[in-house]
Amino acid sequence: MADKMKDNRSGAGSGALWRRAPLVAILVIAGAGLILLRDHLSFEALRDNRDALLAFRDSHYLLAVGGFIAAYVAIVAFSLPGATVATLTGGFLFATFPGALFNIAGATIGAALIFLAARLGLGDRLAARMDTGEGAIRRIKQGIDSNQWSMLFLIRLVPAVPFFVANIVPALVGVPFYRFVISTAIGIIPGAVVYTSVGAGLGEVFERGGVPDLGIIFEPRILLPLLGLCALATLPIIIKAVRGKSEL
């Protein structure tokens, strides 16, 4: 009996290690990428290789599209540096449209992969513990559960929320996969279109020897509509809170 219990514990431990392997791999590759790829996934690298990239796109368009999306997926899935540069590259190579679609596709697929890795490694157990917990932790989990769509759209629309955080947190609190994918694909559209349009104008920026204005998203003409979308996302939360108080 003791040996059987020992074998069960060993098997459970081994299973837990296998479930966490994808998340551990992502963290290791992210750390290595931060050190090794910082200079290769930069605006300067794009500027220096722009002619070769344009020539490859013109000669092998479909291959360029597939390669670009695959590269974007890898950057997001492994949290490598250069996501903003990748978005600019999408605009530079493919214009605002369909470049924005390629950027959204790559970002969404990459986000889905890291979500699944986090869910597999930690998410289910952590969500279960939060459900069975008491006090503030359980209330936080219940608050997220009752307003999932609004919260998911909100963390995508607010520019201050890091993309990595917006990918990991939903996995750790038990958000359904389909909700995560839909809210990601839709929620990143405004920012993706803005930065892709900046990338579409990089040709002129390169000619002037300048750098792109990445602060454009904080200009009133861009920021105010984003804040309006954030307000719409929070509206259901406010309505529920008001109804809850009125029922007391």
Image: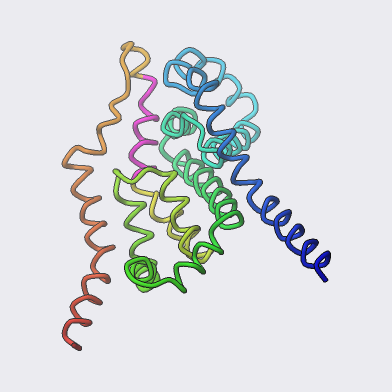
Quarter of the picture holding the C terminus: bottom left
Q: How many marks?
A: 0
Say if 176 sits above or below 45 in the image: below
Say if 138 sits above or below 160 in the image: below
Rendering quarter of residue 116: bottom right
- Tell me what residue is drawn at x 34 percent, y 53 percent: 155
Q: Is residue 190 left or right of residue 82?
A: left
Say if 221 sits above or below 34 in the image: below
- Tell me what residue is drawn at x 33 percent, y 65 percent: 150
Residue that sits furthest to the front in the current view: 2
Rendering quarter of residue 134: bottom left
Residue 107: in magenta span: no
Quarter of the picture holding the N terminus: bottom right
x and y percent of residue 128 in the render? 51, 69
Q: Is residue 133 left or right of residue 122?
A: left
x and y percent of residue 202 in the render? 38, 23
Q: Is residue 42 left or right of residue 235?
A: right
Residue 200: in magenta span: yes
Rendering quarter of residue 236: bottom left
Q: What colour scheme does the image use?
A: rainbow
Comparing 4 with 191, the one in front is 4
Say if 58 sits above or below 98 in the image: above
Q: Is residue 34 left or right of residue 3?
A: left
- Tell me what residue is drawn at x 55 percent, y 52 percent: 118
- Tell me what residue is drawn at x 63 percent, y 24 percent: 59
Which stretch did the figure color magenta? 191-203
x and y percent of residue 120 in the render? 61, 57
Q: Magenta region's main secondary structure?
A: helix
x and y percent of residue 23 in the render? 59, 46
